[in-house]
Image (spheres, rainbow, N blue to C red):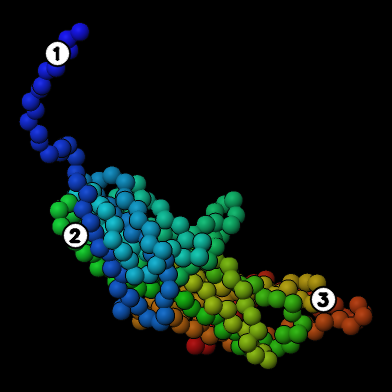
Amino acid sequence: MMILVSAVSCQHKDLCYDHPHNGKLRVVFDWTKASGTVDENMELFLFPDGGGPALHYQFYNMSGGVIEVPAGVYRAVCANAGAGANRFEGTSASYGEFKVTTRAVNKAGDIIVEPDMLYSDHLGDGIDIDGVSEQTLVMYPVQKTPRYTVILRNVRNLNGAKSCAASLSNLSCGYLAALDEAYDDSHIQNFDMSRSGETELEGPFIFFGHRHGGQRAHILMLDFALQNGSDMTCTVDVTERMAELAREGCMTGDIIIDLNIDIPKPISNGSGFQPTVDGWGNEEININN
């Protein structure tokens, strides 16, 4: 049997398909502009200049690393991963719509969980990934969420209270990281007060900052759970103090309130006069800063 073998000559070319090449991008998170000690895993979002979903990269460190990115022009936003309260939304929308949010704790959605401390930076000019040489992107995360502390003074007979819960009205539920501004100003945020002295309580809280041009009042409500089984509540308008801290650009600050109240003493053996506290529901307290 004869086998005919035919040799076919081919011209070899480099394989190159009509799609963008990947380029190496060295990402550096420079913390020199951040205050205090920071140890955070980081997230990077690259928004294609021509539109489309953002490319999402996670760094399990605070310094960065080398990633592969399809060639193109991108605008960038970085943020720390946080401890689980913060969420990232708008990754399928435009660069300006990307926001960091927290979750609601009620069905109406108007009471929110305290956000984690947010460190972020953004690059609006864009970086052009050429797909050939390794390029470098340096970002400078800084604190974006203020951390204020409410300090209550002259709260006498604190032994008569089991606890004190606080809530603050008209705070933002999110932060537009690419625009450096709070998302809205219509949510309530809860936090706890703890005893810090014989007649003093204090409670720190983190929030997403102040919405530019926001006009809503910030009302602090305090709810004391008393040893006698009743509740004692009062409200304080802290709008002016919050606005003052915002105008000064303070990322930390104290809201000092001279409450000047007496907590009803606990009743021994279940006998004695039961004080009424119903009138406290609409009590307004002046602030002395």
At which x and y percent is residue 10? 9, 28
Q: Does the CB distance between marks 2 and 1 fall below 8 Å?
A: no
Using residue 254 as the reference point, say whether residue 265 is left or right of it: right
Question: What residue is at 31 percent from the left and 51 percent from the top?
Answer: 55
At which x and y percent is residue 173? 46, 60
Question: In 3D space, how far apart are the residues under numbered discs 3 and 1 (Cα atoms)?
Answer: 105 Å
The picture quadrant where one finds residue 98 is bottom left
Residue where numbered disc 1 is placed: 4
Residue sitting nearer the eye, 183 or 61: 61
Q: Does the CB distance between marks 2 and 3 fall below 8 Å?
A: no
Say which element carries label 3: loop
Circle 2 or circle 1, nearest the eye: 1
Q: In the displayed image of the protein, which residue is found farthest to the top?
A: 1
At which x and y percent is residue 251? 40, 78
Question: What residue is at 14 percent from the left and 13 percent from the top?
Answer: 4
Q: Which quadrant of the figure contains the N terminus?
A: top left
Residue sitting nearer the eye, 83 or 277: 83
Residue where numbered disc 3 is placed: 228
Task: Give the mark nearest the N terminus, 2 or 3.
Answer: 2
Task: Give the mark nearest the N terminus, 3 or 1.
Answer: 1
Amino acid under disc 1? Leu
Question: What residue is at 17 percent from the left and 12 percent from the top?
Answer: 3
Amino acid under disc 3? Asn
Question: In 3D space, how far apart are the residues under numbered discs 2 and 1 (Cα atoms)?
Answer: 51 Å
Residue where numbered disc 2 is placed: 134
Using residue 41 as the reference point, say whether residue 160 is left or right of it: right
Question: What residue is at 31 percent from the left and 69 percent from the top?
Answer: 29
